[in-house]
Image (spheres, helix red, strand yellow):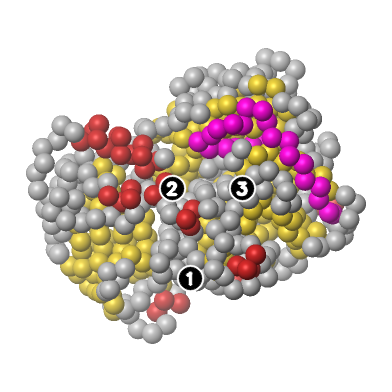
Amino acid sequence: MRRLLATVSAVVLTGALLCAPAEAADPAGGAISDSATSVTWNAGPFAVPNTTGLLGDPICNAVTVCDDFRLTVSTPAGYGDTHDLRIQIGWPNAAADFDLYVLDAAGAIIASSASSGDPEVVLLPPTSGVYTVRAVPFAPLAQSLTGTASLVAKPANPPPSTFPAPAFGSYAAPAGLAHSNDAGEPSIGVDWFTGATMYQAGLGTFRVLWDANGSPMWTDTSAPLALTSLDPILYTDPTTGRTFESQLAGKTSLMEFSDNDGNTWLPSQGGGINSGVDHQTVGGGPFAPNGLGALTGYPHAVYYCSQDIADASCALSRDGGVTFGPAVPIYNLLTCGGLHGHVKVSSDGVVYVPNKSCGGNQALAVSSDNGLTWTVRKNPLSTAGNTDPSVGIGANGTVYLGYHAADGHARIAVSHNRGVTWESDQDVGAQLGLQNIVFPAVVAGDDNRAAFAFLGTTSGGNYQDAANFHGVWHLYVSTTYDGGTSWKTVDVTPNDPVQRGSICTAGTTCGSDRNLLDFMDVTIDKQGRILVGFADGCVGACVIAGPNSFSAWATIARQTGGLTLFSRYDQPLKGKKK
């Protein structure tokens, strides 16, 4: 939907522009090497949008114009062990939108950055060869662009944590459960009073209870209003036990809430007036001391955030999610582009919404006054990526931002001052040789303990190339017990791939490889056990050898051993591993 919104915006903003021909790249090509590490070019202005990328790979001809720059790379053997090839395009007016593609000598797309952010950046191995750097004017607004290709040193990575990695069991929903194989982009939460795990995907809401041996009992507790949806989302407030189930319906949602783990549901207004039309998220937590407080006996604030054409917004509920105030913009297209991740609230009432592309960096929209005002705080150590980032917040406010970087790798950074400054930004997949990841999901417990879950593969290259990418994907969880100084990453599904081949993260332009949709989720129970809600896209014969089943089976990975995210429970966990 985000590309559809961009198309509408592009037509509105460019319809009155004269269709002057674009200027070709100047110069038309260039070369970089280990001794001459950078080259720059300019192109434009561009007046006519090229939105053919909505249907797949962009089409370039005299009518649907692209700009191509021929890049020659010459590097010695082993140079890629310590260096990356960084390619970037940028333009003066951030409301415009260009997309970046890199093609190899055979004309195959090997990397892309097609968000609505400025700049667009990709990181690649600096392999010697001839490449085409293609800029596509998706919504150009008569802008010119500047491109830069450079060889840059890889940031140093600290050694892995010396803490033992936690163990996990993987538990799939029963085949007879409605919606069990329609679980793309799941949400997960835990009611700390009852121990019930709540799992939402599509129109289905499941309650999972765990016996003394750690075996699950799944029950369908779907809400009565869950009949149609553009996007599903679930949020369980662990300390109040209230679960919210939201189904997007344009500029609001059909939302219900339950105080008994889905046995009964009550209706909600669904969202704030003038909320966005896409990609809603629901979250909650304590009220900020300097903001508006509760109107009823329900002690926590509830937030409904969503994206529109020119901005994203959040609305506050002061009555436990029954009604919401008006939606307040948290950023606009001049500040950030693309979709936001899930809203999270810290113990001191600070609200965080992560974004994958704000001026070329991952960032947080932050509010300290219950959503009345917002500030965008970028992680300057980061690069923008192609999938939503995620934030986890420790008990005393330490913030962990996990994200998909421009090179496709899994990175996470730490802030101790609400995102003003960042430290310990590192690639947690490097210790297992992971080259591509999707669906970052982060949760924290004690201030110095956090978990970062994602799908990953050791195969490099364009993971969205359905014809040529043959990577095998697994679920990984990386944990820290020292405040993000070091991490230990473990393959949670070593003998059971989650997907074979490509995973498309380009929204409605995807083919059958969008079976997992756009994200997954992670949470913890009252003892600090890590629980990951994911969709299994590889079942049956696919597990052994393929082909991929393109399923979306509701599955939970639950921690069965090792240290949890709460130090007060530092003892062996009960529950056998499956």
Side of 188 relative to 59 (left or right) = right
Q: Amino acid at mark 2?
A: Gly
Residue linked to disc 1: 470
Q: Nearer the viewer, residue 342 or 27?
A: 342
Residue at image x 59%, y 20%? 269
At label 3, counting other C-alpha atoms closer than 10 Å, the crowd grade (few under 14, some 14-19, many 20 or more) is many
Labels 2 and 3: the sequence-earlier one: 3
Task: Say if 232 sits above or below 536 in the image.
Answer: above
Residue identifier under label 2: 507
Q: Are there few (<14), some (14-19), or many (20+) residues within 10 Å of tag 2?
A: some
Compare marks 3 and 1 and give the one earlier in the sequence.
3
Indicate the position of residue 519 as horizontal and vertical percent values. 55, 49
**Residue 131 numbered mark, or none:** none
Residue at 81% over, 63% down: 577
User: In the displayed structure, would residue 41 be above or below residue 241?
Assistant: below
Q: Is residue 231 magenta?
A: yes
Q: Is residue 367 left or right of residue 200?
A: left
Q: Quadrant of the N terminus?
A: top left
Which quarter of the rendering shows the C terminus? bottom right
Give amino acid for label 1.
His
Disc 3 marks which residue? 183
- Which residue is painted at 65% across and 21% down in the image? 267
Percent x, y of residue 143: 20, 44
Quote the CA–CA distance across marks 2 and 3: 16 Å
How would you rate the neighbour count of disc 1 (Cα within 10 Å): few for under 14, some for 14-19, many for 20 or more?
some
In space, the residues marked 3 and 1 are separated at their CA atoms by 23 Å
Look at the image and give the residue range highlighted in magenta.
Answer: 214-235
Please name which of the two marks, 2 or 3, marks the residue nearer to the observer.
3
The reply to whether the magenta stretch includes residue 514 is no
Which amino acid does the dot numbered 3 rest on? Answer: Ala
